[in-house]
């Protein structure tokens, strides 16, 4: 068995070992390929990195990304000092007492905002920061929250609205309600069952769940949880509704992307939702601040004199157009991914279901998606976590309506929206303007803090609100919703006067 002393000797760039969960790993050759950058690995060179590693990486990361020969074996735990994050692990409340009374807490949740407030008390500090953070000055996040209110409803009255039908088909799957769970990484930070809670909840209630590439559980387990629950729901009339889709991040290494697509096919995921808004990861300052604090307190000397870069700053000077060389700053996913990569992705997916592009923020890119034969566009600014001061998805929908109305009228491409959706009325507004369905990210992550019951409650709250709003504006079926039910004037004042060229710009062959 190795000892802490053996590991401590490998504390430099030319030989860098770390301890994770009492096992040693040689990451020397992995330094420049590490999506979180080499700096953070070098800070922990020769030391125990478990406390920082664990909350960030999905289970199985070491097996998937680090060659087996670099797994050096167990380290005697009496021979080194584990580094633990000094910051208290829970939020600002008595979480352990409260966790025992989840049913009571849920009974007090009458809206998604209530679920968020309750989750803030239950979640660990790193989980709360990771879920709630957004990019830069939070401008995009604020647009997401405020734009829904700029559209008002125009109720038509004196209609028989006793019975409503809220079902819809999206990406070839039947849904009981016109919303689904947005892909969000690392649900395991909120609950030990993480994504499994979301999968079971979606199946039980007959809604869609688009699972992140970066899930805390293997995609096969999530799919088993979903289809297992769907089978149990048969007979209740719900079992033929519900959908499991796969969100794809195109990775720096083509092999990793191909493996993800294979996992999606094997797991019976019915659509591929490719995220296009993340050539680099946004500058989320709360996340970065937390890491700096943890590192500074665990390793007091590593920031002496402020001379070192914060951990998420790998060298950016060598980034080039060829897709090789060091990763660009915050280059967690592929930064060369472009329209010409759709060819090999399609080939690998082999028509296993529709393909959607997630992260469209302009009418030009919506048009380009149509010319590339994409089945669905998913308007989103990533919950304000990527580029700051970007338009909300409902703003982008209005832009498309103004400049390319045919994209909506033809109904050849389905249209999804997410970002700041917190009320059933928001979803009704989007549907009035031509959206197929809406999705929610953070509210569902917060609901996971209360396990399966939390997820079911979030779905129930939202579906109740949709039905009530439909009745109050005089609609009984989703097909009846149209733009006469909404006043969009305020938000339309903010639209651009003209568009740029809907061309992909300079010719960009695939570099992957
Ligand atoms: C030892 C083997 C390691 C492997 C194979 C590995 C692998 C990965 C992978 C695949 C990602 C991308 C995950 C994603 O897309 O969210 C990542 C991100 C990251 N890793 Fe590691 N990692 C290792 C060790 C560490 C250690 C020891 C630390 C810190 C002490 C660390 C800190 C980070 C950070 C900060 C990110 C960026 C997370 C984000 O902003 O999304 N990693 N790593
Ligand atoms: C914690 C968190 C993790 C996310 N992870 C992913 C991801 O892995 N893939 C992706 O395409 N989008 C990801 N997103 C963006 C969501 O899919 C979605 O666009 C966003 O959360 C919608 O905004 P909302 O949180 O206001 O509902 C993430 C969002 C959050 C909050």
Image: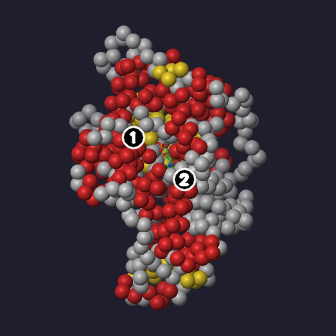
Q: Residue 204: horizontal and vertical position, in percent?
A: 29, 41
| Secondary structure beneath label 2 | loop
Which circle, 2 or 1, is nearer the viewer?
1
Q: Can residue 116 be seen at all in this image of the molecule?
A: yes
Q: Compared to 85, does 267 lie above or below?
A: above
Q: Nearer the viewer, residue 124 or 315?
A: 124
Q: Residue at x 62, y 43 (%)?
A: 389
Q: Residue at x 62, y 29 (%)?
A: 400
**Image coordinates for residue 201, horizontal then vertical, percent:** 32, 44
The residue tagged 1 is 113
Most extreme residue toward the right, as rendered? 506
Residue 212 horizontal/vertical position (percent): 46, 51
Residue 129, x across and y down, in percent: 46, 56
On-image quarter of the N terminus:
bottom left
Is label 2 within 8 A of ligand 2 (CB to nearest ligand atom)?
yes
- Secondary element type, mark 1: helix
Report, in whole angstroms, how far the alpha carbon at label 2 lies from the one at label 1. Answer: 29 Å
Residue 378, visible in the rendered structure: no
* Residue 290, above or below 414: below
Query: Which mark is on residue 249?
Result: 2
Residue 321 horizontal side relative to residue 209, left or right: right
- The C terminus, quarter of image: bottom right
Mark sitting earlier along the chain (2/1): 1
Most foreground residue, 345 or 508: 508
Q: Nearer the viewer, residue 2 or 91?
A: 91
Residue lying at 27% horizontally and 46% vertically, measured from the top left = 105
| Residue drawn at (35%, 25%) of the image | 468
53 over 193 or under it: above or below: below
What is the tally of numbered marks visible in this picture? Answer: 2
């Amino acid at each position: 068995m190795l000892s802490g002393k053996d590991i401590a000797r490998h504390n430099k760039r030319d030989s860098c070992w770390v301890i994770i969960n009492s096992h040693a790993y040689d990451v020397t050759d992995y330094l420049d390929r590490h999506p979180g950058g080499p700096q953070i690995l070098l800070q922990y060179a020769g030391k125990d990195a478990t406390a920082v590693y664990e909350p960030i990486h999905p289970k199985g990361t070491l097996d998937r990304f680090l060659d087996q020969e670099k797994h050096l074996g167990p380290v005697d735990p009496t021979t080194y000092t584990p580094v633990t994050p000094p910051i208290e692990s829970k939020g600002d409340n008595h979480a352990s007492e409260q966790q025992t009374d989840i049913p009571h807490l849920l009974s007090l949740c009458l809206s998604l905002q209530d679920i968020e407030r309750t989750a803030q008390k239950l979640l660990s500090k790193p989980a709360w920061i990771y879920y709630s953070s957004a990019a830069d000055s939070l401008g995009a996040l604020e647009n997401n929250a405020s734009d829904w209110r700029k559209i008002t409803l125009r109720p038509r009255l004196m209609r028989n609205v006793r019975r409503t039908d809220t079902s819809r088909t999206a990406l070839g799957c039947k849904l009981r309600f016109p919303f689904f769970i947005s892909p969000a990484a690392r649900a395991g930070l909120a609950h030990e069952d993480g994504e499994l809670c979301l999968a079971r909840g979606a199946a039980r209630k007959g809604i869609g769940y688009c699972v992140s590439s970066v899930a805390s559980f293997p995609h096969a387990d999530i799919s088993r949880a979903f289809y297992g629950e769907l089978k149990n729901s048969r007979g209740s009339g719900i079992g033929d509704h519900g959908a499991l889709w796969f969100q794809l991040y195109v990775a720096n290494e083509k092999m990793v992307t191909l493996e993800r697509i294979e996992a999606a096919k094997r797991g019976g995921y019915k659509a591929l939702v490719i995220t296009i808004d993340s050539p680099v990861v946004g500058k989320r300052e709360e996340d970065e601040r937390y890491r700096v604090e943890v590192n500074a307190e665990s390793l007091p000397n590593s920031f002496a004199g402020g001379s070192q870069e914060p951990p998420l700053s790998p060298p950016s000077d060598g980034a080039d157009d060829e897709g090789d060389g060091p990763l660009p700053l915050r280059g967690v996913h592929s930064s060369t991914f472009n329209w010409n990569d759709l060819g090999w992705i399609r080939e690998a997916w082999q028509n296993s279901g529709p393909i959607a592009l997630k992260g469209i923020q302009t009418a030009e890119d919506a048009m380009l998606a149509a010319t590339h034969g994409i089945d669905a566009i998913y308007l989103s600014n990533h919950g304000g976590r990527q580029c700051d001061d970007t338009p909300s998805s409902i703003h982008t929908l209005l832009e498309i309506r103004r400049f390319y109305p045919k994209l909506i009228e033809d109904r050849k491409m389905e249209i999804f929206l997410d970002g700041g959706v917190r009320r059933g009325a928001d979803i009704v507004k989007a549907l009035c303007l031509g959206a197929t369905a809406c999705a929610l990210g953070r509210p569902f992550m917060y609901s996971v803090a209360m396990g399966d019951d939390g997820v079911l409650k979030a779905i129930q709250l939202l579906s109740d609100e949709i039905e009530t709003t439909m009745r109050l504006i005089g609609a009984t079926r989703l097909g009846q919703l149209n733009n006469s039910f909404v006043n969009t004037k305020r938000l339309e004042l903010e639209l651009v006067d003209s568009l740029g060229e809907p061309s992909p710009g300079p010719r960009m062959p695939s570099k992957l």
